Amino acid sequence: MKNVYLWVVASLLYVSVVSGETGLLNVSYDPTRELYQKINAAFIEHHSKSNSEKLSIKMSHGGSGKQARAVIDGLEADIVTLALAYDIDEIAKGGKNIDQEWQLEFPYNSTPFTSTIVFLVRKGNHKQLKDWDDLVKPGVSVITPNPKTSGGARWNYLAAWGYAKKKYGSDQKALEFVKALFKNVPVLDAGARGATTTFVQRGLGDVLLAWENEAYLSLNEIGKDYVEIVVPSISILAEPPVAIVDAIVKKHGTEKLAHEYVSFFYTPQAQEIGAQNYYRPQLKEVAGKYKNTFTKVELFSIDDEFGGWQKAHQVHFADGGTFDKIYQQ
């Protein structure tokens, strides 16, 4: 696998050299394809107003954990835009290509957009799935990707855990709840987009646990006659961060360009693009324009409920952690 990624990188660099283009590689997670297709086009147009050079931005998408591992193993990303801070921390530790204080480089802890976890159900919602408790009922089939490889799946898992702990009052009750939920999961896809394909195209499951933006994208693509969105009473504040891979941009000579690119995410133009693709914008003036787009929901943060990503990973997702015990049983 490592050799495949290195071959991809070499191919991208070769194309850039022979075409005379200046290029960036953004390694991202599953559901951001549509978002960055539009942001990249807008940035290239913005950049061209003050620069004569030809600019190309290449993308790589996959499960967030797998993408982080690919960068550690040699995929020469100039920028990473992953599903959770833990994956970028792992690159900072494992590959030592990113400064340990990367979250201080850009506003809002280097998180230009936020999201949350919602339910996508079949039209009519015949099993009346309205909140988290409904997902553990007998006969309900839940589609969610694998928390070992997918950042979105970890958000799903922790959203369910946090809900149960708030409602039932203890980690033990939350453990029992999440264990019951995963008994209703028939298959674990590697990433969030794969899980969406399983639910939408393969027709498996009664409900898909999904990023809010992914749920709305599915609703728009296949229509309200087939699926609908259910927003639970409580969910998690999902904060997908971004970082410049310092060692690689120095190697490629793209430091200034990479910083300009990531800074562009925080402009009103890019924040508008995010909102139009159902990511919650950070800029208040843009968020106010889209307040009717996003359903109000009680949100809890990873820091408040789990003590941050390092602790959450060690307890729940590390080898031999809570998820392994739940799923093996």
Image: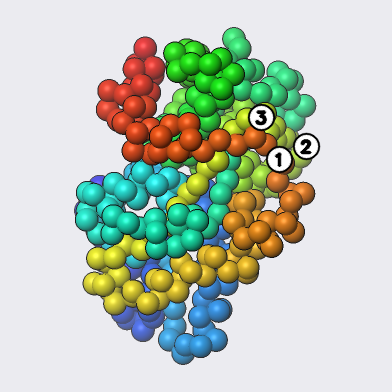
Separation of residues labelled 2 and 3 (CA atoms): 21 Å
Q: Earlier in the sequence, mark 2 or mark 1?
A: 2
Note whether 254 is above or below 203 in the view shown: below
User: Can residue 247 be seen in the rendering of this structure?
Assistant: yes
SS label for mark 2: loop
Front residue (pair 267, 17): 267
Q: Is residue 153 visible?
A: no
Q: In this figure, which residue is indicated by the disc labeled 3? A: 232
Which residue is disc 1 drawn over? Answer: 296
Tell me the CA gap for discs 1 and 3: 10 Å
Name the residue type under label 2: Asp
Describe the element under mark 1 as helix, strand or loop: loop
**Disc 2/disc 1 C-alpha distance (Å):** 24 Å
Q: Residue at x 66, y 29 (%)?
A: 232
Here the colouring is rainbow
- Density class for disc 2 (Cα within 10 Å; few <14, some 14-19, many ≥20) is few
Residue at (55, 65) in percent of width and height:
266
Name the residue rendered at 45%, 74% in the picture: 260
The reply to whether dot 1 and dot 3 touch (C-beta < 8 Å) is no
Query: Considering the numbered disc 3 on the image, is that residue within a helix, a strand or a loop?
Result: loop
User: Does the CB distance between marks 2 and 1 fall below 8 Å?
Assistant: no
Q: Earlier in the sequence, mark 2 or mark 3?
A: 2
Task: Return the x and y of residue 56 as percentages of the image width and height.
Answer: 44, 74
- Reading the image, the residue beneath label 2 is 225
Please name whichever residue, 11 or 236, is drawn nearer the observer in this view of the structure.
236
Residue 307, given in percent of the width and then of the height, sits at 40, 34
Question: The disc labelled 3 sits on which kind of residue?
Answer: Pro
Q: Which mark is residue 269?
A: none
Answer with left or right where residue 319 lies relative to residue 111.
left
Q: Does residue 127 appear to the left or right of 179 in the view shown?
A: right
- Graded by Cα atoms within 10 Å as few (under 14), some (14 to 19) or many (20 or more), the crowding at tag 3 reads some
The amino acid beneath tag 1 is Lys
